[in-house]
Image (cartoon, rainbow, N blue to C red):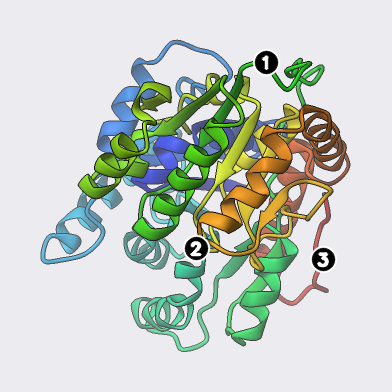
């Protein structure tokens, strides 16, 4: 099976490890995989040294413009198709249809991806990874049918967990719906966590920075905890506070700046985050991010906003859920994992077992392959793989 694995700029940067795991798994199952990445990410990956977090050097790559729409979209499509044809000829394939599947991770390139799939008569397989994706489903289906000039043209919606699959099903889309739970590798052992309440405690914050009020409430809650946990250290992705001057002023007023370290691209360079004790996810956008699964696998205690579109967040088993996105809500949740290291260790161990049982990386690959096969044989009985 010939697969085009396409990532948008955000996924290419922050989900690099997952993309590589998926590519390696597909290659191991006999698929021929070509990557399509934004030009800057493609240059970075081919220049990067080999390793578990580098996606370079496995197979051919098509570098495309990060622009997905607008007046230049037809030009970008033509360039993409010329490169696909060149690669097909270099591999001895018939250039008219170099791919059977166009698997897309990241909705910022959906428009270009469906144009590519339609032009190459391939089946689009699109990951529905956030609430924002749900709002575009019907429009994308209509656009693909127009591009194919065939009202019956269909692709596949791929959901990273059962909660998101249910949300897709409730919309009643025309395309097939399949489940492919994201998975991660389990470290050989969970990291050693702080033995005493007086020990230093590292709190990592992962946020896209779209909502200012929850971040402000989180900073206030952290300031409250700092009075009871003198060893509190805070590590945050610089994207979280970027563009929010009021948050910087608030952090300064709360006396947090000396405890706060800003880190660029934490999800792409997550080793430091995974050495923390607690991971906090203050966003609520129905988004799925593999760093949360990696944190659970490493035995971190996770505190996150309650999220009905993500079934990995289970109160008391995999995470402490923040029920209200205000100062008191964050304070109550964080106190459980910051002030009680024993509870935090138990929660991290429970989450680690859950990931081992429910979200192994090889289960993700098997489910993706099952979705590909369902797309290739649409009349066959539907088979939804589980991890």
> How far across and how far down the image is residue 178, in percent?
70, 66
Q: In this rendered view, identify the residue nearer to me: 208 or 222.
A: 222
> How far across and how far down the image is residue 196, in percent?
77, 17
Identity of the residue drawn at 35% across and 83% down: 146
Q: Are marks 1 and 3 in contact (CB under 8 Å)?
A: no
Is 73 situated left or right of 362 in this image?
left
The residue under label 2 is: 285
The residue under label 1 is: 199
The residue under label 3 is: 383
- Looking at the image, is mark 2 or mark 1 nearer the viewer? 1
Is 1 situated left or right of 263 in this image?
right
Assign a secondary structure to mark 3: loop
Q: Are marks 2 and 3 in contact (CB under 8 Å)?
A: no
Q: CA distance from mark 1 to mark 3?
A: 50 Å
Q: Which of the 4 image quarters holds residue 245?
A: top left
Q: CA distance from mark 2 to mark 3?
A: 29 Å
Q: CA distance from mark 2 to mark 1?
A: 33 Å
Relative height, residue 155 to residue 370 (above, below): below
* Label 2: how many Cα within 10 Å (few below 14, some 14–19, many 20+): some
Identity of the residue drawn at 66% across and 60% down: 310
Q: In this rendered view, identify the residue nearer to me: 335 or 111.
A: 335
* Label 3: how many Cα within 10 Å (few below 14, some 14–19, many 20+): few
- Looking at the image, is mark 2 or mark 3 nearer the viewer? 2
Relative height, residue 94 to residue 22 (above, below): below
């Amino acid at each position: 099976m010939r697969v085009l694995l396409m990532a948008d700029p955000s996924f290419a940067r922050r989900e690099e490890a997952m993309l590589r795991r998926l590519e390696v798994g597909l290659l191991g199952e006999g698929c021929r995989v070509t990557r399509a990445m934004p030009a800057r990410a493609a240059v970075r990956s081919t220049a990067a040294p080999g390793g578990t977090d580098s996606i370079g050097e496995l197979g051919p790559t098509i570098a495309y413009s990060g622009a997905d729409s607008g007046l230049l979209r037809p030009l970008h499509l033509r360039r993409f198709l010329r490169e696909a044809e060149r690669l097909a000829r270099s591999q001895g394939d018939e250039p008219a249809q170099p791919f059977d599947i166009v698997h897309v991770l990241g909705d910022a390139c959906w428009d270009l991806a469906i144009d590519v799939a339609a032009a190459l008569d391939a089946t689009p397989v699109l990951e529905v990874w956030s609430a924002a994706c749900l709002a575009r489903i019907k429009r994308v289906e209509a656009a693909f049918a127009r591009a194919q000039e065939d009202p019956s043209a269909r692709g596949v919606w791929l959901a990273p967990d059962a909660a998101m699959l249910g949300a897709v099903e409730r919309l009643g889309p025309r395309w097939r719906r399949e489940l492919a739970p994201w998975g991660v590798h389990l470290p050989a052992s969970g990291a050693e966590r702080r033995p005493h309440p007086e020990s230093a405690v590292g709190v990592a914050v992962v946020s896209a920075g779209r909502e200012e009020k929850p971040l402000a409430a989180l900073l206030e809650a952290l300031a409250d905890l700092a009075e009871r946990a003198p060893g509190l250290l805070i590590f945050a992705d610089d994207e979280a506070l970027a563009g929010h001057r009021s948050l910087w002023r608030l952090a300064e007023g709360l006396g947090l700046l000396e405890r706060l370290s800003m880190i660029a691209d934490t999800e792409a360079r997550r080793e430091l985050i995974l050495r923390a004790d607690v991971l906090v996810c203050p966003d609520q956008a129905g988004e799925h991010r593999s760093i949360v699964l990696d944190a659970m696998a490493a035995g971190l205690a996770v505190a996150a906003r309650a999220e009905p579109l993500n079934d990995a967040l289970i109160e008391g088993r995999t995470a402490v859920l923040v029920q209200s996105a205000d100062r008191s809500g964050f304070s109550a949740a964080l106190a459980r994992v910051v002030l009680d290291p024993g509870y935090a260790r138990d929660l991290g161990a429970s989450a680690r077992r859950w990931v081992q049982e429910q979200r192994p990386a090889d289960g993700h690959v098997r489910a993706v392959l099952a979705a590909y096969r369902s797309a290739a044989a649409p009349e066959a009985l539907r088979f939804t793989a589980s991890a």
